[in-house]
Amino acid sequence: MNETDFIFKNYNLSNIANGSITWKTPSNIALVKYWGKREPQIPENTSISFTLDACFTLTILEYSKRQTPHGERDSASHENNFNFEIYFEGEKKNDFKPKIATFFKRIEKYAPFLKDFEFIIKSENSFPHSSGIASSASGMGALALCVMSLEKELNSAMTDAYFNKKASFLARLGSGSACRSVEGPLIVWGKHPEIEGSSDLFGTKFPYKIHDNFKNYQDTILLVDEGEKQVSSTVGHALMHNHPFAKQRFKQANSNISKISIALQNGDLSAFIANVESEALSLHAMMMTSNPYFILMKPNTLKIINEIWEFRAATKSNICFTLDAGANVHVLFPEKEKEKVNNFIKSNLMQFCQENHYICDSIGKGAKKISNI
Ligand code: PMV
């Protein structure tokens, strides 16, 4: 499929009533990281992620038809002639509007009906706002899905497969990693010769049978640093443009996709662990060697990593860690080690979290439409 397959034309507004749509969309955690992109939001390498379950954004899109033809009205509530208000966790958030307006502008070519409506967007996260957990994946994913449900109202013949592909395609234009939040449990984004059906334009389900070792895999997120990120991912991606190690990094990530694909199929936990931890450290190595350079890990991030390594060596556990673009640590482990690892987290790792905060999550199935709440 290419971009033109997602352009929607010839719709008829006369049969559509005012209404509202709700989507619950999970966050995801990359195993092989996306870091570096080119226009229009095309990844420089393939990435793969676990879709999460407990960490999600719930978004309600209330829509009503605009009374006058689009483009004619102008008021303070219009951003680039899109008409919407945004509420986050019950509060009106005008400072979120430019980001949403940019998103709408980017997807307008594919969803031209956006200017025919007035929207009220109400959004909330299941995880604390200041937790340092990136909400752009679940947030943009949820909004893209709401837009797609509206498109479906205008085109009832749309198939589920097309719906999901286009939702992921639109989400990607909002935030790259968001395209991996539409479905689950394991999503690939970025064309790769060894992953059938993979695309730069949208996320696709890992197409091969996943070994039972990875069934219901656990992800406990240790909140080391609850606060705004020092460096936005937009800035981080841009720093890969003149990065001295960029070419090698993209090659490494694509080769890690081949390796992790095999480990996921044959259940090789040691290979999985080596791959996932190396990816996390490579991501941070890119940040430490960019110009300007920065360190997003905190002293407690390193303490946790060392504790995990010691515990693994002493107990032969299959625990491992990964990191996002921040100081928090995602602790990954098989479901059958849940009790043992949870005890270890409580006794040894919790002390390194801000106010002892951590979130127990596991692999999820993807976004869900909520009928009426
Ligand atoms: O989707 P963005 O632009 O916020 O970038 C996300 C980048 C990482 O979270 C660091 C890695 C990834 O693949 O999710």
Image (cartoon, rainbow, N blue to C red):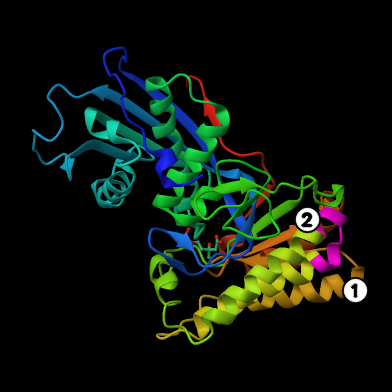
| Above or below for 253 versus 103 | below
Q: Nearer the viewer, residue 140 or 56?
A: 140
Question: In the shown orientation, is residue 185 left or right of residue 289?
Answer: right
Q: In the image, residue 277 lies at what x, y percent?
A: 71, 71
Q: Is mark 2 on a helix, strand or loop?
A: helix
Q: How many marks?
A: 2
Dot 2, crowdedness within 10 Å: few (<14), some or many (≥20)? Answer: some
Q: Disc 2 designates what residue?
A: 342
x 55%, y 46%: residue: 181
x 32%, y 15%: residue: 16
Q: Disc 1 designates what residue?
A: 314
> Which range is magenta?
263-271
Q: In the image, residue 87 lies at what x, y percent?
A: 32, 39
| Above or below for 228 versus 115 | below
- Amino acid type, mark 2: Asn
Q: In the image, residue 44 lies at what x, y percent?
A: 51, 67
| Main secondary structure along the magenta-highlighted residues | helix
Q: Which of 17 and 3 is in front in this view?
A: 3
Mark 1 residue's CB less than 8 Å from ligand 1: no
x 45%, y 19%: residue: 156
Dot 1, crowdedness within 10 Å: few (<14), some or many (≥20)? Answer: few
